[in-house]
Structure formats: C-alpha cells, structure tokens
C-alpha cells in the first residue's frame, strides 16, 4: 500500500467518525500539555489505535488520541500525544498525522513541546515561541522519493515558523500580561538527555531550547504548505546549567505548574487565527 493510500484510509476513517465536521486548525500537544484537549467543546475522541495505519503513543504524559471539536469558536483537531523517532518509529510514521491533518483540510498547525532551556536567561516554566529550529536528528523525513502532490522536492525553510503567527503570539502574550520568550529550538533524537558538553555545543550553534520532537513534523507541515506556530514550555534547564539530574517527572511537574498560562495563551491565539 502506498503512503498516499494509507493517508486516505486514515482520513476517511476519521471523517466517518466526525461526520460533517471540518477542522480549521491542527494542534500537536507535547509532554504534559495534552490538557489543552480537555478544553475542547463537543469533543469527539478517536484513539490512535482505532485509526488505520496510525502508530500508537508510548510515552508517559501522552494520552494517545485525536480530539475533534471547537476551541474558542474555531474548529480544531488536537493530537493529545505525539510520536517520537526515539520510540523506534520511522520518520514516515512520526510525521504521518501531519499528512492526515493536511488531507482533512487543515492549513494552520500549532505545535507544542516541553523543552530543556539552553539559553541561560530562561527559567523553568517560561513559554517560548519558536522562531526557528536546528535539525539535529541526523536525518530528514523527506529523504526518499518525492511526491509532487505532497509538496516540492526542495521545500523552502526560510520561514519554517510563520512570522505572522509569531507576531500574533507575541501580541497576544503582551495583551495577557505574560512574558513570552522567543528562540531557536534544537531537535535531537533522544531518548537520552543531552550531556553538559552537548548543551555547550548547542548554545554555540545558536540553540535556545532543546527537545526530542517537533522538527520532523514542522518539516512535513511546511512541505505540505501549512502555516506553523511553535510554542515550547521550558520544563527544565538543560544539563550543566543547574547542578541537578534531569528526569521526565520534572518535565511533567513543570508543565503542570504553567498549564494555566499555556491554556490561556493558546486558546486566545486560536480565537484570533484567521
């Protein structure tokens, strides 16, 4: 079966579940941030395990379902949990849901993640709008034959993250009296956290935050002509900045503390998106 057929089968199944509902905005919710999906009105929840050709999320803090409904007056499709390269999935599978979102007619994607702070001016609990990224995965989800119906062979990544949506996020944060950092997200494979030496290297390269997701999904979204807004929750400072070990529990604890600000910010941004 071709990937085109797999995408069509998955989207057809979803369309059967949601009927005439047409989502405008896609949301990809990272570790500890899936709580946003609980704010969706008249939700239709579809477990990933029920969707043809879909992988299954295996990481704590990822619920593993699509949630369709209305958020602040806009129709949305929210991924409550995502897939990671370190789980052993191919890049095709990691990015498969983004292709399905495109097939469903979605043109705007908000991608969120929990990330380690590299910029020493950041603090755990800060929210950061992603201005750009560095692909440090050592691979690219577009390697292999290109289908022109999906996008161009050589997609432009000079504005991977929509400048218009970045300005909207910053203006919204200002209106709400929130501090919103801006910076470069570095995507690593994981599943190990970085060493202090690696963090120093990434800072030298221009990274402000580091995580194990987002970059492959954004590449595919841009390949498909979708506009992207990225928001990171700085869940901890990366190795070597503070004299303490890193663990996933801290990621979940920090995202829990900032969830009120995160929810308010993203819901307000959604309400203003055209």
Image: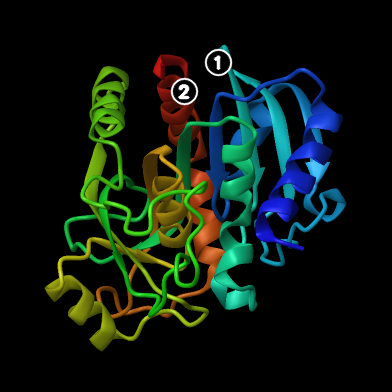
- The residue furthest front is 148
Q: Earlier in the sequence, mark 1 or mark 2?
A: 1
Residue 75 in the image: state x and y as whole percent.
61, 20
Q: Residue at x 48, y 62 (%)?
A: 146
Which quadrant would residue 60 be assigned to in this image? bottom right
Q: Position of residue 137 (x, y in %)?
A: 40, 75
Q: Which mark is drawn over residue 89?
A: none
Above-or-below relation of 231 to 239: above
Q: Is residue 167 left or right of residue 135?
A: left
Percent across and percent down for residue 188 are 40, 74
Q: Which residue position holds label 2? A: 270
In the rendered image, the residue lying farthest to the top is 73
Residue 174, visible in the rendered structure = yes
Give the camera-side residue of 18 and 211.
18
Q: Which residue is mark 1?
A: 72
Local crowd size for mark 2, using a 10 Å CA cut-off: few (<14), some (14–19), many (≥20): many
Q: Nearer the viewer, residue 60 or 96?
A: 96
Check if mark 1's residue and mark 2's residue have beta carbons within 8 Å.
yes
Q: Is residue 271 left or right of residue 121?
A: right
184 lies above or below 16: below
Residue at the far left in the pictured view: 204
Quadrant of res 205: bottom left
Residue drawn 77% across and 17% down? 20
Residue 63 in view, yes or no: no
User: Of helix, strand and loop, which one carries label 1?
Assistant: loop
The local crowd at label 1, few if under 14, some if 14 to 19, many if 20 or more residues have their Cα within 10 Å, is: some
- Calculate the distance from the C-alpha at mark 1 to the C-alpha at mark 2: 7 Å
Name the quadrant of the N terminus. Answer: bottom right
Q: Residue at x 55, y 45 (%)?
A: 28
């Amino acid at each position: 079966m071709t990937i085109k057929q797999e995408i069509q089968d998955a989207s057809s199944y979803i369309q059967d579940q949601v009927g005439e509902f047409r989502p405008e905005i896609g949301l990809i919710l990272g570790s500890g941030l899936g709580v946003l999906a609980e704010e969706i009105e008249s939700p239709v929840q579809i477990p990933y395990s029920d969707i043809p050709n879909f992988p299954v999320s295996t990481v704590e803090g990822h619920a593993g379902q699509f949630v369709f409904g209305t958020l602040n007056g806009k129709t949305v499709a929210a991924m409550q949990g995502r897939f990671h390269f370190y789980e052993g999935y191919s890049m095709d599978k990691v990015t498969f849901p983004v292709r399905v979102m495109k097939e469903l007619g979605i043109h705007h994607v908000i991608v969120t993640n929990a990330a380690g702070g590299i910029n020493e001016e950041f603090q755990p609990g800060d929210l950061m709008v992603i201005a750009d990224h560095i692909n440090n995965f050592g691979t690219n989800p577009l390697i292999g034959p290109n289908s022109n119906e999906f996008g161009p062979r050589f997609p432009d990544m000079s504005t991977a993250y929509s400048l218009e949506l970045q300005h909207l996020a910053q203006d919204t944060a200002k209106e709400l009296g929130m501090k919103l950092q801006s910076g470069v997200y570095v995507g690593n494979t994981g599943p190990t956290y970085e060493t202090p030496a690696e963090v120093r290297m990434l800072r030298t390269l221009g990274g402000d935050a580091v995580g194990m997701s987002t970059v492959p999904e954004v590449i595919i979204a841009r390949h498909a002509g979708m506009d992207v807004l990225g928001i990171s929750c700085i869940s901890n400072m990366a190795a070597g900045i503070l004299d303490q070990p890193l663990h996933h529990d801290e990621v979940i604890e920090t995202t829990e503390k900032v969830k009120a600000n995160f929810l308010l910010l993203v819901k307000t941004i959604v309400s203003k998106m055209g």
